[in-house]
Image: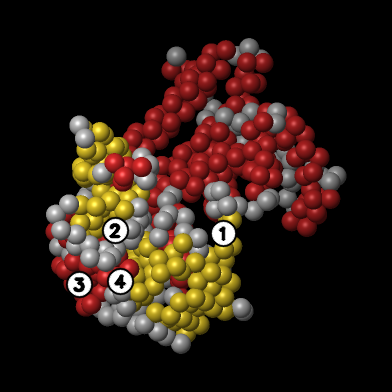
Amino acid sequence: MIQIDINKNLHGVDKNMNLDINLTINQGDFIALSGVSGSGKTTLLRILAGLEDAKGTIKVHNNIWLDSNKKLPVQKREIGFVFQDYALFENMSVEQNLLFVNKNQKLADELLELTQLTQLKNRLPNRLSGGQKQRVSLCRAMMSQPKLLLLDEPLSALDLSMRNKLQKEILALHKKFDITTIMVSHDPSEIYKLASRVIVLQNGKITDDGLPKDILLKTNGSAKFSFEGELLDIKKVDVIYIAIISIAQQIVEVVISQDEVQNLQIGQNVRVGTKAFTPTLTI
Amino acid sequence: MIDILSNIDFAPFILSFKLAALTSFILFLISLPLAWYLSQTSSKIKPFLEAITALPIVLPPSVLGFYILVVLGSNSPIGGFFEQLFDIKLVFSFTGLVVASCFYSLPFMVQPLQSGFESINKNMLEASYIAGKSKFETILKVALPNIKPSLLTAIVVTFAHTIGEFGVVLMVGGSIPDETKVASVAIYEMVEIMDYSMAHIYSGIMVAISFFVLLAVYIFNAKQNKKFGKFI
């Protein structure tokens, strides 16, 4: 069990913010940390890793990592950390990157096999693609056989198919080695597939905490489906109005009535849902 | 011609190289921790340290030479202390030249190392700490191997700059044959006594050596860039 009760003043770009987190995480949980950028997700991860200072206490499996008179150095925390930009050791081959953490050749071979990197083990990082680098980074994080794996938006720089593939690998590693994982992610489908619990941060505070399906599924009432998007334009065509909305990477058109038009402003975030056949737009 | 060539006294060159090699070695050991500290700290004293380190670039060598004479001369407390206790003369001696060169060439060692360390992705160093490695091991196995071009630049430029020294060595060392009469001083003396043919030969040798040393550095750096891609 991991108990976190920390406090830190952050100096943001436009305002100062107080990161105030009180959280208990069970062994084996897969936590997704979500929230807009600047809400304190990465800082929380870095405090857990010991890369940044904070006030308060962190207790992991009854070992004290942080309290008022002690801060366990980052070297002694035995965690795995995957950086958004991979941060591989550029001077070492794939295999050397793994063995630098821990001289366990058997574990290195096993991890490389599991992530299909065996053939690339002698390459230098700058000869790898983004997805391959991220796999190496993941394997390297696993080399210390961590109890706690911290992932800072590990897949955000990758394309969709690579992301799907790596999501499976992350989940496989999480289960195989029975670790507790905390992952920063913005991608609802990723969170849904991987996480057993979602924590949403806003301005340094936890605003939502629960099961992925409770927090991510936004349909309400009798709506059959519901998407969030940005209203880009409203066009008048004869007697009807057409709203053009950007949802994820797609642009859709929805027919709306004149009454609806009056309540809408271009640039607003709207929710597109449907009950029977005609999609409805609500703010 | 053969007569002239066989008459060349190589002692000043050997002295120059000895001085440059020793200075580079000592400065490398001193500058490594200093450059690492400067690259990692955000302390308020950083600008002061940086300004002091860069001073020798700006100051006329005569100013530096003058202060070294004042501080390290036999009549000064420091100079007197070394002379009485260890029988080491810190001015008008080879030891004095080494000390003076270390001051004079300090920025040429510290600055490339510092900018090399600063160019390293901080996450890469943090990844090493997370892997349980100490700062020392991280510097040795992660930081230094990733700044090879900076390392080479720092060492070679320091070496070359020390060979090219003139003002400071003249003031602090004078021109004692086999002791402080380095190549640059020897050329100056030849010009003064209007021995232009010898001055030509000496100067030509200096130009050739300097050019090939710099060429080697640039070739090495180009190869490293190819090997490690955009990272360095």
Judged from the image, the secondary structure of the residue bearing numbered disc 4 is helix
- What is the quadrant of residue A41 in the picture? bottom left
Q: Which of the two discs, 4 and 1, sits closer to the camera? A: 4
In the image, residue A237 above or below residue B129: above
Give the mark nearest the N terminus, 1 or 3. 1
Give left or right: position of A232 versus B112: left
Judged from the image, the secondary structure of the residue bearing numbered disc 1 is strand
Outermost residue, bottom direction? Answer: A62
Name the one closer to the observer, A156 or B65: A156
Residue that label 4 marks:
A214
Q: Which labelled disc corresponds to residue A187?
A: 2
- What is the quadrant of residue A26 in the picture? bottom left
- Whole-percent x and y of residue A124? 26, 52
Contact flag, marks 3 and 2 (Cβ < 8 Å) = no
Contact flag, marks 1 and 3 (Cβ < 8 Å) = no
- The structure residue drawn at horizontal position 26% and vertical position 74%, both measured from the top left corner, is A174
- Whole-percent x and y of residue A88? 33, 56
Residue that label 3 marks:
A172
In the image, residue A170 above or below residue B186: below
Q: Which labelled disc corresponds to residue A17?
A: 1
Q: What is the distance, in whole Å, between disc 2 and disc 1 at their CAs? A: 25 Å
Contact flag, marks 4 and 1 (Cβ < 8 Å) = no
Color encoding of the figure: secondary structure
Q: Residues within 10 Å of mark 3 (few under 14, many from 20)?
A: some
Which amino acid is tagged 1?
A: Met
Q: Which of the two discs, 1 and 3, sits closer to the camera? A: 1
Name the one closer to the observer, B219 or A57: A57
Which amino acid is tagged 2?
A: Asp
